[in-house]
Amino acid sequence: MLMVRGRAGGTELTGTLYERGERAPSFRGAPDEDAAYVWVCDEFYEVDSGGSTQLVDGREVHLAFESPMPRGFDTREQALEGAREHVRTQFARIGIDPDDVSLEVEKNDG
């Protein structure tokens, strides 16, 4: 499995990309188990009050979380691009310019 991590505004978000032959978690809404690559990561957005508080770029941001929406992909390249886009989008939803997000991919054997 691969961990795709984005960092910006003093915070980070990490999702998991399950590769061909690895067993991705199964739950309602999960992609067909025949998908070669499965991406799972939190989704969140900014709310005026409530939610979880996170310090981002020196300001308090209230986050509401949605259920993770796993996505299946046919190729590793499609999966990595989808993962990177997902992470950038989450930061954009809390006011961070997607171009300011530093991304890294690391292999996680556990």
Image: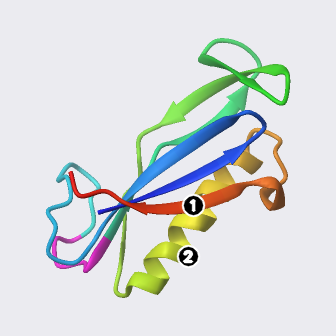
| Residue 23 is inside the magenta segment | no
Local secondary structure at mark 1: strand
**What is the number of callouts on the image?**
2
Query: Mark 1 or mark 2: which comes first in sequence?
Result: 2
In percent of the image, x 67 and y 34: which residue is there? Answer: 11
| Amino acid type at mark 2 | Glu
**x%, y% of residue 29?**
29, 55
Q: Is residue 64 left or right of residue 78?
A: right
Q: Which residue is mark 1?
A: 104
Q: Residue at x 47, y 43 (%)?
A: 42
Residue 66 lies left or right of residue 88; in this view the side is left
Q: Main secondary structure of the magenta part?
A: loop
Q: Which residues are magenta?
A: 32-37
Nearest the eye: 17 or 26 = 17
Give left or right: position of 9 versus 34.
right
Relative to the observer, which residue lies in front, 77 or 93?
Answer: 77
Q: Which residue is mark 2?
A: 81
Q: Tag 1: residue type?
A: Glu
Q: Judging from the image, what secondary structure is the residue with disc 2 in? A: helix
